[in-house]
Amino acid sequence: MVGDDDWEELAGRPRKGRKPRKKKQHRSKADRLDAEHHRAEQNEFLRGLNDRQGRYEWMKEERYNTMFRGIEAKIQGAMGTGTYDWVDRRVFDQVFDRLTLMALYKMMKSGVIDTLDFPVARGKEAHVFHGTNLAGEPVAVKIFHTSNAVFKNLIQYIEGDPRFTGLRRKHRDLVEVWVRKEYRNLNRLARWGLNVPFPRGVHKNVLIMDYLGSATSPSPKLRDVVIEDPSPVYDDLLRFLAISWQKANLVHGDFSPYNILWHDGRACIIDVGQAVVDSHPKAQEFLVRDVTRLVEWGQKNGMDVDLAGAMYEVLNMDLSDVEQVELLE
């Protein structure tokens, strides 16, 4: 988290003690020209924001402008500038507002992430970006939309979950609860050794987790992959549902080839924000739906499977060998 000193710096409060004088660094003419071009590009970007019918009027406030200036070089992937000038600048409009800026600023200052690079996925609820941590390792940065009413349709997955009682129905509250819910669900599934992206951090409407993919593109969805031998994949996914239900006491709630990535020769389950605990009023209904979708995938891939047999396996599979694992962050 950000310490008090970070906010004092933003507020312009003097710090105690004198700062050591920095040695002047001599830059080449080419470096100076590159820096001037970059600054001109950033200023043009900000002027463009000011022209958008007051939507970014808050950016003129010294506090937020200072925040933005402090991380602008690290979020070029959202701005469509610099190295990532190929990114559609409308992405910025879709994901950025005052609280998103504050969340990214805090996570960058606290060292959870270092850069926000290019967008790799877009859904109704969120955009996912390729990013890096301080070690230069890739991470996935999931920024949930704060002005999208779609979360009102997802209240059924939150109400009835004892982990999130006393929920206020304001849109901003729904978004933040949903993000915390996905973070906690990922943690719970990972503790049981299930193949999900490991969560690295969460704040407000921003979730950081392991990145699945190459340096240029994310891993493909299961629906887009031709599986030569679907039987072991089906068995692996059936075991995932069984462990989730019997051990982690969770139901995914939207278990489909759209929410499964094919990474390093294995299925990895994503988008677990809607997963509910087994005591949820609709848990059994969601479980039957999840198993049905898996059976349908198996049948489409030429397997002789049925819902009755799959449900029996999920409810009665011998999991005596499954134990919680120690998570190494």
Image (tube, grey):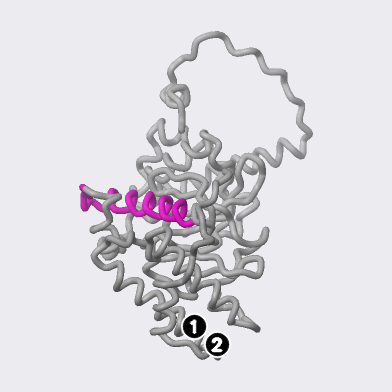
Q: Residue at x 54, y 40 (%)?
A: 112
- Most extreme residue toward the right is 28
Relative placement, left or right, of 170 versus 35 is left
Return the residue at label 2.
Answer: 301
Whether 179 is among the magenta residues is yes
Between 65 and 256, the one lying in front of the other is 256
Q: Is residue 111 above or below residue 207?
A: above
* Mark drawn on residue 297: 1
Element type at marker 2?
loop
Q: Nearer the viewer, residue 315 or 250?
A: 315
**Is residue 149 visible in this depiction of the protein?**
no
Residue 177 shows up from this direction: yes
User: Type of residue at label 1?
Assistant: Trp
- Quarter-wise, where is residue 314 in the image? bottom left
What is the x, y in percent for residue 143?
A: 45, 53
SS category of the residue bearing label 1: helix
Query: Circle 1: is it few (<14), some (14-19), or many (20+) Cα within 10 Å?
Result: some
The location of residue 92, given as percent across then percent down, is 47, 54
Residue shown at 37% from the left, 60% from the top: 249
| Part of the protein shown in magenta | 166-189
Residue at horizontal 27 percent and vertical 56 percent from the top: 161
Give the amino acid type for the residue marked by disc 2 in the picture.
Answer: Asn
Q: Position of residue 145 (x, y in %)?
A: 38, 56
Query: In the rendered image, which quarter contains the C terminus?
Result: top right
